[in-house]
Image: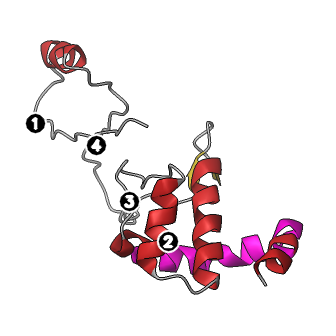
């Protein structure tokens, strides 16, 4: 599986088509544009922009979040291995061996698995309430 790189460039002026062509020629693919503007008047501060939670993605209509199947598989595997009292390093090794990568395309480490604990706690009720989890629980016991 190829590693994916991301590059974010801050733009201080108009978009330069020549720069876009240079990046494309170097193998980069434009995946997003972000716009901002000044708005006169008062009003609520815009919400803090947060990363989409691991295991979810923005739906095609951009109105909601939907499940990201591969990331959800990684979360379930993490839960299974942690429930079996495996160390974070073993969980990372298993994820890497099965071809899972972090959202940034890097290999899992004990630290990256540890940082997923809040997300695992958040998603656990959804996984634990499914019929699939009942079957898995008997297998893991």
| Residue 34: quadrant of the picture | top left
Checking the image for residue 49, the label placed there is: 3
Residue lying furthest left: 12
Q: Secondary structure at mark 3?
A: loop
Query: Which callout, 1 or 2, points at the residue further toward the start of the chain?
Result: 1
In the depicted structure, whether residue 120 falls above or below residue 5: below
Read off the magenta span. 114-134
Query: Which callout, 4 or 3, points at the residue further toward the start of the chain?
Result: 4
> In the rendered image, is residue 52 in sight?
no
How would you classify the magenta stretch by its main secondary structure?
helix
Where is residue 110 shown, x and y percent of the image? Answer: 37, 74
Q: Marks 1 and 4, how far apart in space?
A: 12 Å
- Looking at the image, is mark 3 or mark 2 nearer the viewer? 2
Q: Marks 4 and 3, how far apart in space?
A: 13 Å
**Residue labelled with disc 1:** 12
Q: Marks 2 and 4, how far apart in space?
A: 41 Å
- Looking at the image, is mark 1 or mark 4 nearer the viewer? 1
4 and 3 marks in contact (CB < 8 Å): no
Depth order, front residue of 104/109:
109
| Pointer 2 local density, CA inside 10 Å: few below 14, some 14–19, many at least 20 | many
Query: Which callout, 3 or 2, points at the residue further toward the start of the chain?
Result: 3
**Residue labelled with disc 2:** 91
**Residue labelled with disc 4:** 36
Query: Which callout, 2 or 4, points at the residue further toward the start of the chain?
Result: 4
Left or right of residue 121: residue 116: left
Check residue 64 for magenta coloring. no
Checking the image for residue 111, the label placed there is: none
Q: Marks 3 and 2, how far apart in space?
A: 30 Å
Depth order, front residue of 101/104:
101
| Pointer 3 local density, CA inside 10 Å: few below 14, some 14–19, many at least 20 | few
* Quadrant that contains the N terminus: top left
């Amino acid at each position: 599986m190829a590693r994916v790189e991301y590059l974010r460039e801050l733009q201080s002026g108009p978009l330069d088509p020549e720069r876009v062509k240079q990046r494309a020629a170097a193998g980069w693919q434009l995946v997003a544009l972000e716009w901002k503007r000044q708005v006169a008047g008062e009003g609520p501060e815009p919400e803090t922009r947060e990363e989409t939670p691991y295991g979810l993605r923005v739906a095609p209509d951009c109105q909601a979040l939907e499940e990201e199947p591969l990331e959800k598989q990684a979360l379930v595997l993490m839960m299974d291995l942690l429930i079996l009292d495996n160390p974070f390093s073993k969980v990372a090794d298993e994820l890497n061996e099965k071809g899972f990568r972090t959202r940034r395309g890097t290999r899992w480490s004990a630290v990256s698995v540890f940082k997923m604990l809040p997300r695992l706690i958040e998603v656990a009720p959804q996984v634990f309430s499914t019929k699939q989890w009942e079957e898995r629980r008997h297998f893991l016991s």
